[in-house]
Image (cartoon, rainbow, N blue to C red):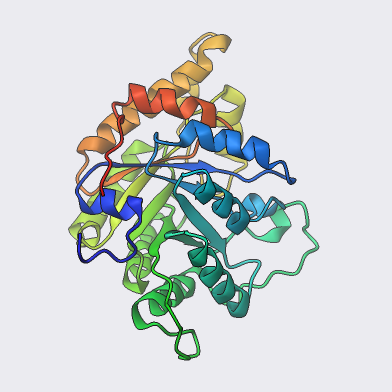
Amino acid sequence: MDDLKSGSNLEKVLKAGHFAFTGECGPPKGANVEHLREKFRHLKGVVDAVNVTDNQTAVVHLSSWAASAIMVQEGVEPNFQMVCRDRNRLAMQSDILGVYTMGVRNMLCLSGDHQKFGNHPQAKNVYDIDSMQLISLVKKMRDEGKFFNDDPIDVPPRLFIGAASNPFAEPYEFRVYRLAKKIAAGADFVQTQCIYNMERFREFIRQANDMGLTEKCYILAGVTPMKSVGMANYMAKQVPGMDVPESLIKRLKGVEKNKVAEEGIRFCLEQIEEFKTMKGVAGVHLMAIEWEHRVPEIAERAGLLPRPVIE
């Protein structure tokens, strides 16, 4: 453990060879931090780190850095998310230093959904740099102790650098090469888009294994339990880059209405069981989407508890 890049709990768990388990929490569309703290309590001790989304789907929420700071106060490890949509390089570097001083040790670098999909479609975007440049920027700040312009940093931020990968977006054949570029830019770990098409994901991870990518970076498979048939149809038809097979929708339709959520959880548990034995998959990232209270149950049924404690 002497060569840790950040010293975060997530990094220690992965480096020790444990099957990692991360959660996610969307900050509120307001300043109701008590509800936010309640969400944290469901996740504390159940996952290794919790992603804190940054104005997800281009809709205004409490800032990711503020929610991350509250999470640190509550004794839960955040995975601070930053999107390129809303900040230029000055604001990015300033916020990176800021969250580090507040105890944040993991950071996920994202492009961010275009503002036209959110609740301020008339807003001007920024995209001063893209997600791969953001990854390399954080790596430069951490490993070289320099800002983007090569000015030296007094106490560089030591962060475990994350990136996202969507194995399902078109052109499908290009996805593994985009993953390779993010790893080359400096990603230490990657969390994937929600996986429902297991056949396509098996092929994606096979390609990543063949290219040696899974030996350079930890891959965490993304899962989200379906709560209803309506949710499955919405994700299949309305969410860009999502691949929901018709076979899964038929499976959910095949049970009584009051048992659809349980069937969604069962599918999620089957996925986790396969990921545990899948070469190249180092863990699971569970995006519960306002189902934080069900995460302890899912973790227990998946055999992921207790979580390892590494000093």
Quarter of the figure that contains the N terminus: bottom left
In this rendering, is residue 175 above or below 13?
Answer: below
Residue at image coords 32%, 72%: 184
In this rendering, is residue 205 above or below 134?
Answer: above
Residue 37, by quadrant, is: top right
In this rendering, is residue 200 above or below 186?
Answer: above
Front residue of 180/76: it is: 76
Front residue of 122/102: it is: 102
Residue 147 shows up from this direction: yes
How far across and how far down the image is residue 157, in percent? 43, 72
Position of residue 144 in the picture relative to residue 127 (left or right) = left
How far across and how far down the image is residue 9, in percent? 34, 51
Residue 172, by quadrant, is: bottom left
Query: Total number of numbered labels?
Result: 0
How far across and how far down the image is residue 243, in percent? 47, 41
Residue 4, by quadrant, is: bottom left
Farthest residue, direction right: 122
Front residue of 96/129: it is: 96
Residue at image coords 64%, 71%: 87
Residue 289 shows up from this direction: no
Front residue of 92/5: it is: 5
Residue at image coords 47%, 59%: 103
In this rendering, is residue 264 above or below 258?
Answer: below
